[in-house]
Amino acid sequence: MTDQGINVLRIDSSGRQDGSQTRQLADEFLKTLGQTSNINQVMVRDVSEEMEFIDHNWIAANFTDDADRSEAQLERLKTSDTLVAELEEADLLVIGVPVYNFGIPAALKAWVDQVARARKTFRYTENGPEGLLRNKKAVLIAASGGTEINSSIDFAVPYLIHVLGFLGIEDVEVIKAGQLMMDAEGSLKKAMQQINGFELKLAS
């Protein structure tokens, strides 16, 4: 966190540009946060827009030592390097998580694959894996049509909590707007109560 305030990285992943509950709730969250916290900047990454999937060329480049990478390999990792830099700069992550078919959108999984980089965002030690992204907090804004968030059939939120913890981000809070097809009004009301009651505490 800088003396000027916190750096926020907002990640949108809904395939909907209009009518997305995760996008609308993220708007409300950041508006409310701005009333109680000094925000230096909000970086916005919409992963639904042409997020690259990793392939054999990406994998080969990633596992080549930095000094030995060809120009083509450096170019192949450019998107990943940018996404990792955004993570490193952020104090707070705000991730919109629509639950699609019990899991996360493919575009959000592609983002995970781009930022989970051995020797950059995590490393293996004699005591096991160690996340390298420390002193950060994440807020997951999760919405679903019929799946209860954090239930036995929700493979989206638990997965992201695990991945973030693997990368070193262990302070994760979930704002839930689940089962919107059953009780949209009630679910959104509870989500807004969570947003209005949110208190930002960052590790120093």
Image (cartoon, grey):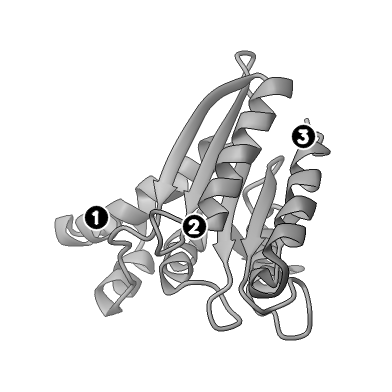
Q: Amino acid at mark 1?
A: Leu
Of tags 1 and 3, the one toward the viewer is 3
Q: Which residue corresponds to the image point at 64% horizontal and 24% vertical from the top-left?
A: 34
Note whether 162 is above or below 81 in the view shown. Answer: below
Are circles 1 and 3 on residues that touch, CB within 8 Å?
A: no
Q: How far is the residue under mark 1 from the one under mark 2?
A: 35 Å
Q: How far is the residue under mark 1 from the one under mark 3?
A: 34 Å
Of tags 2 and 3, the one toward the viewer is 2
Q: Give the image location of residue 148, x and y in percent.
A: 74, 75
Q: Which residue is mark 3?
A: 202
Q: Which residue corresponds to the image point at 52% horizontal and 44% vertical from the top-left?
A: 10
Q: Quadrant of the N terminus?
A: top right
Q: Which residue is mark 1?
A: 74
Q: Amino acid at mark 2?
A: Ser
Per the image, label 3 sits on a secondary structure element best described as loop
Per the image, label 1 sits on a secondary structure element best described as helix
Q: Give the image location of residue 71, x and y in percent.
A: 16, 55
Extreme residue in the left direction: 72
Q: Quadrant of the C terminus?
A: top right
| Mark with earlier residue (1, 2) | 2
99 or 54: which is nearer to us? 99
| Mark with earlier residue (2, 3) | 2
Of tags 1 and 2, the one toward the viewer is 2
Does residue 36 appear in this view?
A: yes
Q: Which residue corresponds to the image point at 55% horizontal and 83% vertical from the top-left?
A: 101
State the mark number for residue 54.
none
State the mark number for residue 20.
2
The crowding category of the residue bearing disc 3, from other C-alpha atoms within 10 Å (few below 14, some 14 to 19, many at least 20), is few
Are circles 2 and 3 on residues that touch, CB within 8 Å?
A: no
